[in-house]
Structures are given as C-alpha cells and as structure tokens.
Image (cartoon, coloured by chain):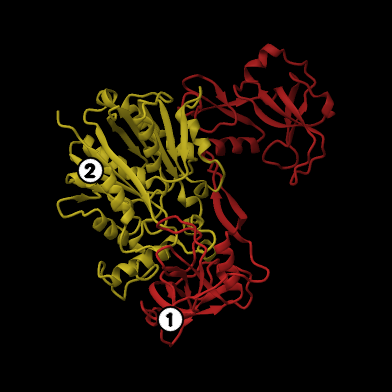
Amino acid sequence: MPEILTAPLTVSFPFTRSLGPVQSAFLTGLRERTVLGVRTTDGRILVPPAEYDPVTAEELRDLAEVAPTGTVTTWAWNPAPRDNQPLRTPFAWVLVRLDGADTALLHVLDAPGPHAVRTGMRVRIRWAPERTGAITDIGCFEPYEGEEHGGPAAPHDGAFDDPVTGIVTPARLDYTYTPGRALSRHLAALAEHRITGERCPSCRKVHVPPRGVCPTCGVPTTEQTEVGPHGTVTTFCVVNIKARSADIDVPYVYAHIALDGADLALHARIGGIPYDEVRMGMRVAPVWTGDARHPDHFRPTGEPDADYDTYKELL
Amino acid sequence: MTPRDVAVVAFARSDHHGGADGASEPELLLPVLHDALSQAGLAPGEADFTCSGSSDYLAGRPFSFTLTLDSVGAWPPVAESHVETDGAWALYEAWVKILTGRADTALVYAHGKPTTGDLADVLTRQLDPYYLAPLWPDPYALAALQARALIDAGHLDEPPPAEAHAVLPLRAADFPAPVDGAAAVVLAAGDTARRMCDRPAWIRGIDHRIEPQAPGLRDLTDSPSTRLAAERAGAFRAPVDTAELHAPCTAQEVVLRRALRLDRTVTVNPSGGALAADPVMTTGLVRLGEAAARIHRGASGRALAHATSGPCLQHNLVAVLEGEDR
C-alpha cells in the first residue's frame, strides 16, 4: 500500500470586525491611555465594557473612566509563551479588576516568576509604545506598589477625535493535511500516469476520484480498478474570467469527463483545441507535463465523438 | 399532544487511543456509523433524520462536514443537518426533531481530528474577537485561571511545587491529550426504540445553557449554566446512579460535581471521561453515548450525561437517561 500523503496547509485570514459604540469608545480610549467601563442597569461598572447588559440584555451606553491600576483576581503562570501571545518571556495570565470597576479584564502580567505573583496583588497597565485602538494597546500589566484608588468611576462621554470603528486581527493556523487512504492511493497512481477508481461492492459503480466510500450505498470501496485513460466530455463550460492564481489564458474550457470504465465524471481543463470547438461527446485523453504528479489537462484524441446514449447517465 | 418517548438505542465510537492513522474524516467515520446502524438494524440512509457535529477550524477547511455525508449513504438525498460544535448538540437537534413528530429515527454522529492542527491555537479562535482572541489565550491558560480561582476559594488543593507544570497551577496530566475520533448514536421513538433495543436509554430531558462570553463576568468557581440545564432536564427530580461528565481538565470536574450535586453514591465517568480521551467535537456525544450504553447493558437505571463547549465550561448541556424495567 502506498504511504499516506500529507501536506502542510496554512489558513490565514485578517479577521475584520466592526465595532459597536461602546466597544469603539473603549478601544479608542485605550489608544489615548484612557480605560472606559460601562454602567449596567444595576449600577455595576463592566471593564471591558459590553454593548448589552449580560443579565437583562438591555442596551448599555453609560460610560465611565476607571483607573489604570487594579487588583489580580486570579492568575496562571505560562512558562512557554506561544508566538502570538503578548509577551516573549514567561508571563502570568491574569484577570485584573481595575480600580473603579466591578468586573475583571483578561490580560498578561510581566513578572520575574510565579513566586512574584499572587491573587490580590496590585498591578498597573504598561501601555504599548504604539497604540492603534486594540486590546493589545495594553502591552501588559506590571507589579505596582500602591493602594487602591478610592472613589467611584468618573462619568465619561466616550468622545475622542478620530474614533476607531473596526479592528483587524490577523490570524494564522497551521495544519498537516491528509487526503486519506483512498485518495492517497489514487494520487500515488496518478504520479505513475495511471488513473484509478474504486468499485462499490454493493452497486458495482466505479468512483473516480475515489474517497474510500460509496456515497450512494454508504459502504467502503476497497477494490481498485484502472480507468481511462481515454474519456468522453459529458458537459463543459467556457471560462472567461481569469482566476488570480491560475497561469492559464482565458477563454478556456473546463469540462466534466467520463473516463472509460468510470461511473462518475471528473472535471478538468481541455487543451490542445480552440475553446469554441469543444463539444459534448468529444473523446479526450490526459496530458502529463514535465514531472507533474497529476495531469495538466485533457486533449482531444481524434476518435469519433461518443454517442449521447453512452454517457447520458453521467451528465 | 403528549410528548413522545425518545431513546438512545445504539452507540459506537472509534478506538480512543490516538491518531486517525491516515484516514480521512469519512474513512474514520465509516466503521463507527456501520457499528451504530447495525446495532439498530438500520441500513445506510434509512434513518429518517441525520445530524452531525464537527468544526471546520479543526479540519482547516470550509464545509468539511459535507465530505462525511459520503459515509451515510446520502444519495438519494436524506434529511440532514449539521451543528458547528460538539455532536452532543447534534443529538439535541435530532431529539427535538423526533419530539415534534417529524422523524421516528435519527442517526447522530460527530468527528474531530484535532491532531491535524495545533489545538491550542485553534481553540483561541472561538473566543471574543475584540477583547480576547487578539491575546491568543489558549484553553490551558484559561483552565488554569479557573483552577487558581478554585484553589483560592478552597475547592481545590494547591499543587505540589516540585512537579512539572503545564500552565501553573495545572500539570500536563490535568489535561487529556487530544486524539482523533468519531462517534455515532441512533435515536428512535416509542415502539420503534423498543423493537431496536432490548433496553432503550429513554431521554427524560435535555437542556443546554450558556454563560457570558467574558471570563471576568463569570464566577469561575461555579457553573450556574450546568445547574440550570440540569434543573430543566429534570436531573434533580430523582437521584442518578451514573454521571458522564465532559470535563477536559481535572479542575473542571470539581466545578461540575458541585454544580450537579453529585455525591459518593454516583458513579462518575465509568468510561474514563474526557480525561481518558478527548476527541474534540466528539467528546460530549461520547458522554451521552457511554451513559446510554451503560443503561443498555443494565448497569445503570438512571444516568446523567453532560457535554460542554467553549472556555472554562462556558456552554453546558445536560441530559437525563433512564432504563425501563419490564
């Protein structure tokens, strides 16, 4: 059995979100080194602020400024920071209740070791040198020797010049993708210029490309069989819009092709013939170029066109 | 209209020891689906309703669940649905579907291949995108914040200082190693269930509740959402003899035992629980399946099953299952 294929797969995306009025004021405030909370219907100050009351779901708009100093309510020591996390050296994750707030904010604390961290310790914000209006404008917290600031949070109108209206959080996730056992077998054969399908033990249909299971019967397919290499164009379309990543001139033809011996049409590009001469029933064969692991396209064989009745079930 | 009686009549799960061994999701699922369907005497595609749970973020590709439909014999078309979370919530949807009389039988399945990616990174993407996700707090960090809160409140012992720690106060052994896996359950109503199974596990109630997104808004030492779900599911109306808890961290089992008022008379996690194997997106459905299988075997008369989703037990589902003595 050929080995299972794997390939690195990276998913990266700029996660773009618009902000509500409360979130906008909070994140713009961070840019200006001002921490805002929001007052709930029962008079508590939420930091970070929510757009809606977590208990009553009422809209919240009543902003108030809290202090940049606070108290750790719980913590965890992270001995091995990961790439995207706020600090490069080992740090503590902390929930911090800022002076004037009734709830705690999640962030990180720069400390020399777990011995230097405890619940109830006093901390203050260390601002990031460059701030854009994001939770990371708080670079981290640092230990702070000072009493809790007394007094209630001061009302704030939340108005700043040039308010932040959205955030973009870049994200990247890395995977090792495998197509599975059946497709690995199929792809290994393709690299040897053979096209293989797998036959359903129940309905006897040959599926190309195989996925290890018959989608009609829901049973495993295990019997491999070679199909093609010649086949018949069952249907096609003319592509007039160039895909950004494709190195192919438009217009070109993309077709469904029923390989001889297969009970499912696969799809591929048709080359070696002007696009406006491709037709249903045209006989084609795969073309491997260079040392490619799979066919680049299919070309006409010159055989007489297939009769409609021979492929109508595969349309 | 009197509510219909609905039962779990079959359960199967993949070997819970490790990787998918090169199998694609459909290949991983196929033997599990066949096991569950044959227990119930159903052919592929024969169940009135099919519902699955999984996550594209684990697979690293969009609409990844559609490929698994090859495994259920979905042609000619079947009535089908999917939830982008643990399969326990797929079971909930299927249960509602049968209760409303729109189906008599349902196939529920779940699959997850967390070893495909880096689970610690992947699970940060389920967090609040404004205040949490940009900091990339992984699930181990969040669980450790919860554990510290439990220690401070006197519900958990301080760990011995010399041991190797993952995220202090928790050790690596406090978390399960993520494994790839799949599970399937068959639900059936009334006499159909009695025909399919000698001792059906009747679902007496299911409810699920969620807590605020911000960890700072929650009391991390408690799980009011679990308690409320249990109340609504009828868990406190009579004692249970078995509880299958979905706690992907030792400290979270402490929270759940308190929220569910489980005393020493209750056998907790006879299957080994989520700590023995955590096939992410499948683990909760496995709890429901294991509780039902214990009833099928006659080892339990009344069991509670719990599933969770999100950081620090944010979203919780509780089901109550009973056997019937004839």
Locate residue B81, reporting x and y percent.
Answer: 47, 34
Given residues A172 and A95, the one toward you in this image is A95
Q: Is residue B162 visible?
A: yes
Q: Chain of mark 1?
A: A
* Mark linked to residue B198: none
Residue, far bottom: A145
Q: Which chain, by letter, is yellow? A: B
Locate residue A108, reporting x and y percent.
Answer: 48, 73
Q: Is residue A227 positioned above or below B95 on the image?
A: above
Q: In which quadrant will I find the C terminus of chain A? A: top right
Contact (Cβ within 8 Å) of mark 2 with mark 1: no
Q: Amino acid at mark 2?
A: Ala
Locate residue B63, reporting x and y percent.
Answer: 55, 41
On the image, numbered disc 1 is attached to which residue? A151
Q: Residue at x 44, y 64 (%)?
A: A40
Which image quadrant for residue B303?
Answer: top left
Which image quadrant for residue A29?
Answer: bottom right
Q: Colour of chain A?
A: red
Q: Looking at the picture, do discs 2 and 1 lie on one chain?
A: no
Q: Chain of mark 2?
A: B
On the image, numbered disc 2 is attached to which residue? B303
